[in-house]
Amino acid sequence: MVESVAANLDFLGPVFFHGEVIQQDATEQIHRKLSHIIVSTDPPYYDNIGYAALSDYFYIWMRRAVGALYHELFSTVLTPKSNELIAEPARHNSMKEASKFFEAGLFSFFDNVRKVTTLDYPLTVFYAFRQSEINTANEIYSTGWEVFLNGLIQADYQITATWPLRTEQSGGLRLVGRNALASSIVVSARPRNEEANITTRRDFLNILKREFPPALRALKQGNIAPVDLAQASIGPGMAIFSRYDKILEADGSAMSVRSALALINQVLDEYLTEQEGEYDGDTRWALAWFEQQGFDEGPFGEAETLSKAKNTAVDALVKAGILVSKAGKVRLLRREELLDDWDPTKDKRLTVWEVTQQLIRVLVDKGSEEAAADLLKKVGGLGETGRDLAYRLYTICDRKKWAQEALAYNSLVVAWPELVKLAGRQRPGAQTQEELFDRG
């Protein structure tokens, strides 16, 4: 940790200004010394982390060691907790009341910030909250994002830009065996124009379908990891939502942030599904079967019916080397069952499905970037299509809670820039996802 901090201080170079630190409650009126300021912040993540409770672990020992030197800082037996801006139901009798407290606090903060910040620069907020829930209408949304965005929009801010930055360290104890986020999403916001229009749900959805796909393509071109895609895509969608003063539902009520998030997820699903048109029939069959069965066995009759819909046949899928069929049952071949000496240049029935699975087999299961890069050279343009398939497969695994399988598809996309470089196919000026402190 010391080496890491020292390296970043060294990167900053000589510093010729005097800094001042002021501690205060961010939900109260901002200190009179602070006006025409630039604000960049990383707010609490709803109910994700109990910061004050965690800090007690260190506080009690620091108080013993240096409490006599810093009376003001260590004047209490434990850290103060009652005003901590997190959604902690134990402090507010219920989750509903805890949520109200958190949302009111966020609104107060954003409202205070809007009164003192300079209009020359936007407010930037780092957010990395992945929790998602499914409501009775089978719509997916994130409570943390919903409450955060509510506070921002109610304070009359408009989201003007978002971009993902790779800020999370790999290999931490919290990440072991988990599909944890690799990025924070930076939300850039400015006070909303006082002449902002009112529109309808239908118009909002039409604009979303027109403007959202190009933003998603840009994210994928920047090699955003699949684990981050759903969170990163909230930004471009909410940028459209927040440009309006109000969006009217069919019954005349104002659209909620939750409804907007559900529509954004819906359009994201449609975008990923539409890409299936680029795949061969065998891959389309494998994708549909995987969504139903994973790598488990299923009835031959169902497989045959599905194959007709995808313009292929079970026998052809067996010949393609992606399926095993016996005793009235079929299943997709697992990666460890695929051919070790597979050569795509000699494969008479080459599929995008096999390209993706073989790349993962060599990269993840065998742990060789060089071998995966050699394979990428051989498959040519099908490699990019295989990478796109990894995004779709990750989404399916994430919904089905198949964490280990999801990790494999995420790993392929994360390693992609390095594979392309090793394969000698790096395009001049190609985009890659930035890190928070990018040393070039």
Image: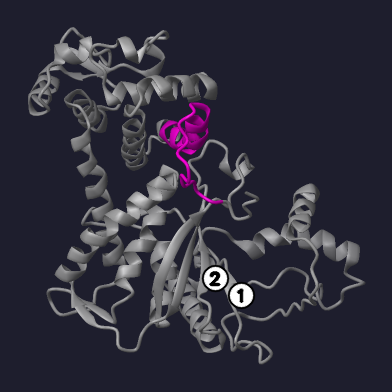
At mark 1, the secondary structure is: loop
Give the quarter of the image for residue 61: bottom right
Q: Is residue 238 left or right of residue 98?
A: left
Q: Could you tell me residue 330's position as x and y percent? A: 21, 15
What span is in magenta? 408-434
Q: Which mark is residue 436?
A: none
Q: Is residue 302 left or right of residue 169?
A: left
**Disc 1: CA contacts within 10 A as few (<14), some (14-19) or many (>=20):** few
The answer to whether the residues at label 2 and label 1 have Cβ atoms under 8 Å apart is yes
Residue 150 at least partly seen: yes
Please give the residue where the numbered disc 1 appears in the rendered image.
Answer: 82
Q: Could you tell me residue 17's position as x and y percent? A: 79, 75
Label 2 to label 1: alpha-carbon separation: 7 Å
Residue shown at the point (80%, 50%) measured from the top left: 2
Q: Which mark is residue 91?
A: 2
Q: How is the image coloured?
A: one colour
Membership of 411 in magenta stretch: yes
Q: Is residue 45 left or right of residue 76?
A: left
Amino acid tagged 2: Arg
Q: Residue 202 or 330: which is nearer the viewer?
A: 202
Q: Could you tell me residue 402's position as x and y percent? A: 38, 34
Residue shown at the point (23%, 26%) measured from the top left: 283
